Each structure stands twice: as structure tokens, then as C-alpha cells.
Amino acid sequence: MKLGPVDGGHVAVLDGLQADELVVVDGADKLRVEARVKVVDRDGALAGSDLLSANQSNAQ
């Protein structure tokens, strides 16, 4: 992934990420194979009731 300018808590992603891909923005150091993760929107609310295992989220 190629990162661009930083503005406060936002970082521009210039290359290496498609619009529909999911990104871990907090707690990446705690990810393990088969770990369950909560998928949230940018406001911190659960995106639906999505709970994915770490390997499932990589597939999306």
C-alpha cells in the first residue's frame, strides 16, 4: 500500500487498496488467525451486525 498526505487522523491511500476492501485501523497488533473482529463504519457504529473472523475479512 502506498500512503500519501496525513491530515489529523486521516491518511490518504494512493495505491494498493480497492474501494470495497476492508482495512484494520485499530488493534491490528492483536489480529490472529480465526480471531473475531467487529466491522464498524467510520463513526464507530457496527456495520450491520458484522462479526468476521480475521481470515474471512481478508477474503473481502
Image (cartoon, rainbow, N blue to C red):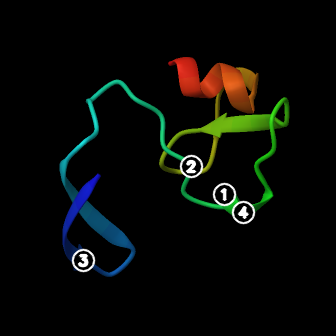
Image location of residue 11, percent across then percent down: 29, 67
Three-letter residue code for mark 4 = Asp
Image location of residue 28, percent across then percent down: 66, 57
Along the horizontal axis of the image, is 34 left or right of 43?
right
Q: Residues within 10 Å of mark 1 (few under 14, many from 20)?
A: few
- C-alpha distance separating marks 1 and 3: 19 Å
Residue at the far bottom in the pictured view: 8
Q: Quarter-wise, where is residue 29 in the image?
A: bottom right
> Disc 1 or 3, which lies upstream in sequence?
3
The residue located at (53%, 40%) in the rendering is 41
Three-letter residue code for mark 1 = Ala
Q: Secondary structure at mark 2?
A: loop
- Which mark, by number, is residue 29? 4
Q: Secondary structure at mark 4?
A: helix
Identify residue for label 2: 24
Q: Nearer the viewer, residue 50 or 56?
A: 56
Label pair 4/3, CB-CB below 8 angstroms: no
Three-letter residue code for mark 2 = Val
Three-letter residue code for mark 3 = Val
- C-alpha distance separating marks 1 and 4: 4 Å
Number of the front mark, 4 or 2: 4
> Disc 4 or 2, which lies upstream in sequence?
2
Q: Is residue 59 above or below residue 4?
A: above
